[in-house]
Amino acid sequence: MDRRSPLGEFLTARRARLSPEGVGLPRYGERRRVPGLRREELAMLAGVSVGYYTRLEQGQSLNASAEVLDAIATALRLTTAEREHLHVLSTRTSHRSGPAAPHEEHASAELCTLLAAMGRVPALVVGRRNDVLAWNRAGHALLAGHTDLASPDDPDTRPNLSRLVFLDAHTRALHRDWPAKARAVVGNLRILTARNPEDARLAALVGELAIRSPEFAALWAGHTVEPCGRDVYDLAHPVVGDLTVTQQTFHVPQEPHQSLVTFTTEPGSASSTALAVLQQACGIGEGHGRGGPGESRGTRPYPCSAVGAAPSRDPDRGAEG
């Protein structure tokens, strides 16, 4: 296997973030040639031989037992998500056969019906590469009103959430704490690549982002692992100004690589009012047919941007802070 295997890179990165003092080991005051723990120190903490651990980092040992991986995870003080990531990397590395031609993804008719039924709740369906497979009009208006409403219908034009966060000025300006959003996207993308190591299109996405965004490249090198679940984001929307939304991600049982993502606001809050103004500005809930993801093709982006809830920010301006 490649010496720089994903498993080896992850172990090295996590070992580098620990200090001898942090795990109860003496430093002895000598200069250390590597950041964090040495391999022999980590091996001692995990109760495995130095040679075995070295071969594991170098990708020369296959099929490590669950017990050994758990011992290493404990020594590295991994979070629950990182521990699961370690097991996934070990399994995928030992069975990796190289990039394969990806299959096209589509949101099922049942999911599209669910999106339509959600009406005023901004929602979208995301695929295995963070592609937007479908969204309702509320989700489109909240996150990406500057894009074509029907773009998810075409695999060649559908938006990708990771690409939007790092390469799209409108999305960058939307998030008041863009660095936090960027870290969350990278943490989730790490999980996706570990679960789908043979997806050539996913690998190409990572390569594109690493080349075009120095910020992505720096975050990617840190091997952050964090699954999408529940997050709270402060947005600066170009139509209605500031609002705070809670993002929740639900996995779709029938499609294990797809997720339903929803955005809600605190009832009775200023954010709830802002979201209602946005929906009114975009004509949501005013009898636009079936209300599905492609219900209003041809609607121009932010059709009522003159609605005076708050002055819009310059969409080409960079992130704050």
Image (cartoon, rainbow, N blue to C red):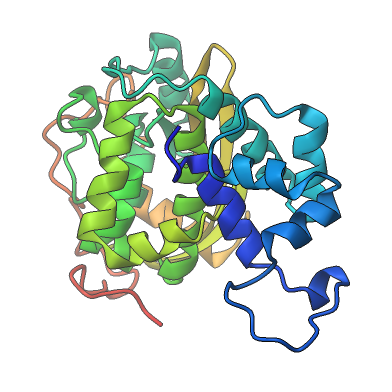
Image: 107 above or below 6 = above
Which residue corresponds to the image point at 57% horizontal and 76% vertical from the top-left?
33
- Residue pictured at 42% horizontal, 37% vertical: 2
Looking at the rendering, in which quadrant would you find the N terminus? top left
Question: For this rendering, which residue is in front, 78 or 32?
Answer: 32
- Image quadrant holding the C terminus, namely bottom left
- Residue ranking furthest to the bottom: 29
Query: Left or right: where does residue 155 sit relative to residue 190?
Result: left
* Count of picture labels: 0
Estimate the x, y position of residue 14 in percent, counting from the top left: 63, 58
Residue 141 visible, this orientation: no
Residue 70 pos. (x, y %): 80, 39
Q: Residue furthest front?
A: 51
Q: x, y percentage for residue 308?
A: 28, 69
Return the x and y of residue 300 as percentages of the image width and height.
Answer: 12, 44
Of the pair 6 and 136, the residue shown nearer to us: 6
Instruction: Tell me if residue 269 can be seen.
Output: yes
- Closest to the observer, 130 or 49: 49
Image quadrant in which you'd find residue 198: top left
Foreground residue, 67 or 308?
67
Looking at the image, residue 201 sits to the left or right of residue 192; the answer is left
Q: Going 16% across and 33% down the picture, which residue do you hit?
A: 157
Give the image quarter of residue 113: top left
Q: Where 214 falls versus 63 (above or below)?
A: below
In the rendered view, tell whether residue 208 sits above or below residue 260.
Answer: below
Report the residue at 30% width, 18% height from top.
Answer: 100
Q: Is residue 309 above or below residue 61?
A: below
